[in-house]
Image: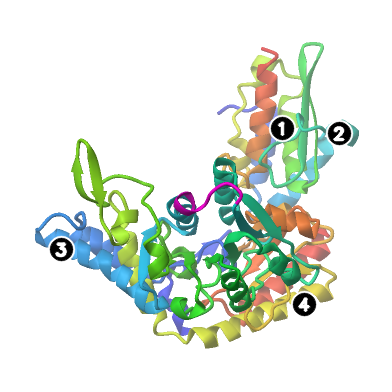
């Protein structure tokens, strides 16, 4: 597979075995062009953005703002705020929109499928503003209970829903969710951390009001992400983090703020990361994401079938639009032990609650082992993985 | 770091084995050294917090010497509990407190000793040491 050559890390060994990296839902690996772009910035153009007039500052500003433009083009969005990642993007909505627009008695609808980063900020806001939180349950087939969802919308001002579950890989029916929310007067925030790596999303066409995601789950650097915001909703947000770069004027009696995205990007931003993310978009634009996704979901489906044949429960359905995540619970080997054993043979997988404890509680389990596949993973790696699981089961199960 | 003789010998034994899976299997076998802490006595207080596996420890003094009782659902944590038992049981508290957690890394079974939610051993080690400190 030619594109594997773009990822230097895939050439390394772990514990004497070739690395087989299956922890992509946690973070993906970076192609050489991303590493080069960040290195080039620090080597040749390092300066702070927006203020100074010297050449380096101009280059840094160009690089940083090019990332914003790339985001707008890639996702078809009018407003793109750069954040530290999905978590900060969601917290930004809670502070910048929530505090300005929610009052006691208002309702926010969440789901049991949410990552903690789309639960905890709302719990904090709920405590502060006496806002009611309602949770949509997850059914036995790993989908949301849409009847309860529809019934939950009365009085709702905001719906927060995960695009694709990081545990189950299930892609939610966002089109229906957004339409129902809007017809009840509620805005919609999509946590798309696991969605954007697998699906080309048109933000304006989706009609979502907010969409949060991270660079590092789509071959970009860690430490940077974005919040896309509907242009009208953007005007209803108030800045919550004060500092340099977000102001127009500051006097000792008060300040005025910028009117564009800079209003929400106080302080020196993540310049190298933005430049690296831009390079990741360039790299990904050479791929047919839809075709790659078809290949990956077929691999995940095959792995899930193999595990079920070994009487290993798998949590997920692996439909066409779902992500290539296989969460499972070995019946006789503890997840933590299994992860260590797999690591001893070069496999990187994730174990634990995956920051989604309410979902695991609903499933009646404490954690799973999660193998997640991305662009550089091959069917051959999947076959090795299943073969290794069989060997470990025979020896330790 | 100087370890008690039994632990030093064990570290050497581990270091002679190249294959990490084999080393993990050796740790699993060390679960036999654990002095069981009965399930019915497991409480929130005895629980090792932030550990992926369900792990409980209880330390008491017997004739002025440390006695570690423990239990966990993950075999690796049980094995590391067994090694810790071998290292500190029967020692005076002040002596037991000299032990560093580095032995797990030196044995080549753990990749990191940083406290984190994925590091059951480190969390367990710190809790055991905190309990021993209460006796000093």
Compared across the picture, whether A258 is left or right of B34 comes to left
Callout 2: SS: loop
Q: Do labels 2 and 3 share a chain?
A: no
**Residue highlighted by disc 4:** A306
Report how far apart the C-alphas of labels 4 and 1 lie in the structure.
38 Å
The chain letter for the residue carrying disc 2 is B
Disc 4 or disc 2, which is closer to the eye? 4
Quarter of the picture containing the C terminus of chain A is bottom right
Q: Do labels 4 and 3 share a chain?
A: yes
- Local packing at callout 2 (Cα closer than 10 Å; few below 14, some 14-19, many 20+) is some
Q: Point out which mark residue A58 bears.
A: 3
Q: Quadrant of residue A33?
A: bottom left
Disc 2 or disc 3, which is closer to the eye? 3
State the extent of the magenta-drawn residues as a range.
A98-105
In reply to whether residue A100 is colored magenta, the answer given is: yes
Report how far apart the C-alphas of labels 2 and 3 lie in the structure.
66 Å
Using the image as rendered, state which of residue B93 and residue A168 is in the foreground.
A168
Residue A391 is situated, as x and y percent measured from the top left of the image, at 77, 67
In the depicted structure, whether residue A81 falls above or below residue B86 = below
Residue at the location (24% across, 40% down)? A254
Residue at the location (70% across, 80% down)? A301
Residue at the location (63% across, 28% down)? B3
């Amino acid at each position: 597979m030619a594109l594997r050559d773009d990822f230097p890390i895939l050439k390394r060994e772990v514990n004497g075995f070739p690395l087989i990296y299956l922890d992509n839902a946690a973070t993906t690996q970076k192609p050489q062009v991303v590493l080069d772009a960040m290195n080039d910035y620090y080597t040749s153009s390092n300066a702070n953005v927006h203020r100074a007039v010297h050449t380096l500052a101009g280059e840094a500003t160009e690089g940083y703002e090019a990332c914003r433009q790339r985001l707008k083009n890639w996702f078809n969005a009018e407003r793109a705020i750069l954040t530290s990642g999905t978590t900060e993007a969601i917290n930004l909505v809670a502070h910048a929109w929530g505090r300005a627009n929610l009052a006691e008695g208002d309702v926010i609808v969440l789901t049991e499928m949410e990552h903690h980063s789309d639960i905890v900020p709302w719990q904090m806001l709920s405590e502060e503003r006496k806002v009611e939180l309602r949770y949509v349950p997850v059914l036995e087939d790993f989908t949301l209970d849409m009847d309860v969802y529809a019934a939950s919308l009365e009085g709702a001002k905001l719906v927060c829903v995960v695009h694709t579950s990081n545990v189950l890989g299930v892609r939610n029916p966002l089109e229906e969710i957004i339409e129902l929310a809007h017809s009840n007067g509620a805005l919609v925030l999509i946590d798309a951390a696991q969605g954007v790596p697998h699906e080309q999303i048109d933000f304006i066409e989706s009609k979502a009001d907010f969409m949060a995601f991270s660079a590092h789950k789509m071959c970009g650097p860690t430490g940077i992400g974005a919040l896309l915001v509907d242009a009208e909703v953007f005007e209803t947000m108030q800045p919550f983090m004060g500092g340099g770069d977000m102001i127009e004027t500051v006097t000792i009696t008060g300040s005025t703020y910028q009117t564009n995205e800079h209003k929400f990007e106080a302080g020196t931003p993540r310049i190298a990361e933005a430049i690296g993310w831009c390079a990741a978009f360039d790299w990904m634009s050479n791929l047919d994401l839809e075709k790659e996704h078809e290949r990956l979901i077929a691999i995940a489906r095959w792995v899930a079938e193999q595990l079920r044949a070994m009487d290993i429960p798998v949590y997920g359905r692996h439909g066409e639009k779902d992500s290539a995540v296989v969460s499972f619970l070995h019946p006789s080997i503890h997840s933590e032990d299994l992860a260590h054993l797999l690591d001893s043979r070069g496999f990187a997988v994730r174990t634990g609650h995956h920051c989604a404890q309410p979902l695991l509680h609903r499933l009646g389990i404490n954690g799973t082992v999660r193998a997640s596949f991305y662009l550089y993973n091959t069917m051959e790696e999947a076959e090795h993985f299943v073969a290794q699981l069989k060997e470990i089961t025979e020896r330790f199960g | 770091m100087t370890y008690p003789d039994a632990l030093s010998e064990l570290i050497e034994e581990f270091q002679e084995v190249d294959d990490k899976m084999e080393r993990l299997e050796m740790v699993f076998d060390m679960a036999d050294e654990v002095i069981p802490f009965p399930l019915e006595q497991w409480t929130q207080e005895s629980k090792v917090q932030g550990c992926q596996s369900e792990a409980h420890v209880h330390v008491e003094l017997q004739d002025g010497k440390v006695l570690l009782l423990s239990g966990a659902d993950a075999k690796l944590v049980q094995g590391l509990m067994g090694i810790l038992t071998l290292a500190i049981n029967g020692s005076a508290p002040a002596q037991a407190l000299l032990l560093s957690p580095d032995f797990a890394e030196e044995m080549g079974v753990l990749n990191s000793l940083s406290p984190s939610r994925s590091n059951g051993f480190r969390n367990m080690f710190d809790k055991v040491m905190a309990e021993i400190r209460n006796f000093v």
